[in-house]
Amino acid sequence: MKKNALLKGTFILTLAGLLSRCIGFFYRIFLSRMFGEEGMGIYELMNPVLTLTFALCTSGIQSAISKFVASETENGGNRNRLRILLTGAFFSVLLSAACAACVYQGADYIALSLLNEPRCAPLLRLAALSFPAACLHSCNNGYFYGIKKAGLPAFCQLFEQAFRVGSVFLFWNYAQQHGVTFSINVAAVGLVIGELASTLVSIPVTWLHFVRMGDLSALPASPLNRIASRILLFAAPLSANRVCLHLLGAVESARIPVSLQQFGYTQKQALSIYGVFTGMAMTCILFPGAITNSVSVLLMPLIAEADSSRNKNAIRTAILKCIRYCLLLGIVCMALFLCTGSLIGNALFHSELAGKFIRTLSFICPFLYLNTTLFSILNGLGKTGYTFLFNMLALLIRLGFVLFIVPSFGIKGFLWGMLAGQLFMSAASLLLLRPHIALAP
């Protein structure tokens, strides 16, 4: 039953993820042709701020909701699940509203002093408006992951992408017809529209889900203060870990254009190279990751259940299958990107540089896809401290390359740093999981 739930959920999320990434993939091509490589670089500089906010406001809470919802029993479990969702959503929306206010008011400072690009300020102000909606539907997704029903999260993912891309396309069509010129800021407007649309679908569907369960008031339930403390005790260190990681990632992202200028590029060239790297090449490399991302999202609650019931054979089987299939996927994708990288760069993005980046980045594919699932297994086993440590050390390795290698070797230095970081995370995770793998079946 659990295996079927994982397979079914993985199929649904993978299908939605692939469709969503297809939409996003061609959306990036559209943006690159509409605003150029420099515009893409400016837009990509905003993403570390968004991921940092998401890490603070909802990533740990979403994982807590998923974990504790999955561990509830049927006797009174439905009422407890509702209380877990509402409690987690309350904390998440409260944090997101505070973060939205801070980012909106401090957009100029963040853009100028932290990102070294004042043109990011309007993007940040617009994106800040999406924070509460994004956190709310992420909490709903966490609930449905916990009960192993991936339909709503998958639909919301597609719905959000469709409205984001559709709205920007309508703006572009309007501009074409009326001779109006839009800046890259219109992409941030699309982001807000997409998040609002997804939330407006997620809330009623979640409400109907609980209505179908009937009267929950007669069922026994845990006290709210106990639920709140469980969520906060689990989410706080996980969120703190992810905030630290994304803070380092933001420093890395802001530093790359600066180091490229030290190598000898102008500011415009540095932003263009950064835009090609993040908005074009990495988009291709991450595209097959829809499969491993889907597995990892549903794997954590299943591993947590197996760990709580001390089903060591189930854990061992999950680890071995993840290693086998993720490495197979990574090796196939590595060969594909090595052979077709230049063709993809020229045909899709009209950029030879994007093709070179895709070919170089292809070597990280086996480790990148494997690490996604290995870290999900470690989190399911309660080893969140180790995942934080491994991520932190890998980021420090990459940051070291950005600070000391990129000024001498250019963007190639950062590509080498990414490969070194992924190799480290794979080796460290497998070493930590070795006792579980070596268990006799």
Image (cartoon, grey):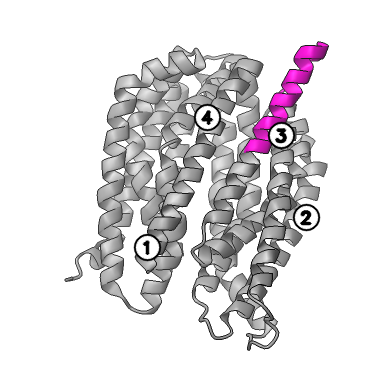
The span from disc 1 to disc 4 (Cα, nearest Å) is 30 Å
Which residues make up the magenta segment? 162-184
Is disc 2 placed on a helix, strand or loop?
Answer: helix
Quadrant the C terminus occupies? bottom left
On the rendered structure, is 120 left or right of 19?
Answer: right
* Viewer-nearest of discs 3 and 2: 3
Q: Label 2 near label 3: C-beta < 8 Å?
A: no
Of the pair 113 and 165, the residue shown nearer to us:
165
> Mark 1 highlights which residue?
4
Question: Residue 170 in the image: x percent, y percent?
Answer: 73, 25
Question: Residue 253 in the image: x percent, y percent?
Answer: 56, 34
> Mark 3 highlights which residue?
190
Q: Mark 2 vs mark 1: which is more N-terminal?
A: 1
Q: Which mark is residue 98?
A: 2
Q: Mark 4 vs mark 2: which is more N-terminal?
A: 4
Q: Can you say whether 48 is above or below 428 in the image?
A: above
Q: What's the amino acid at mark 4?
A: Phe
Quadrant the N terminus occupies? bottom left
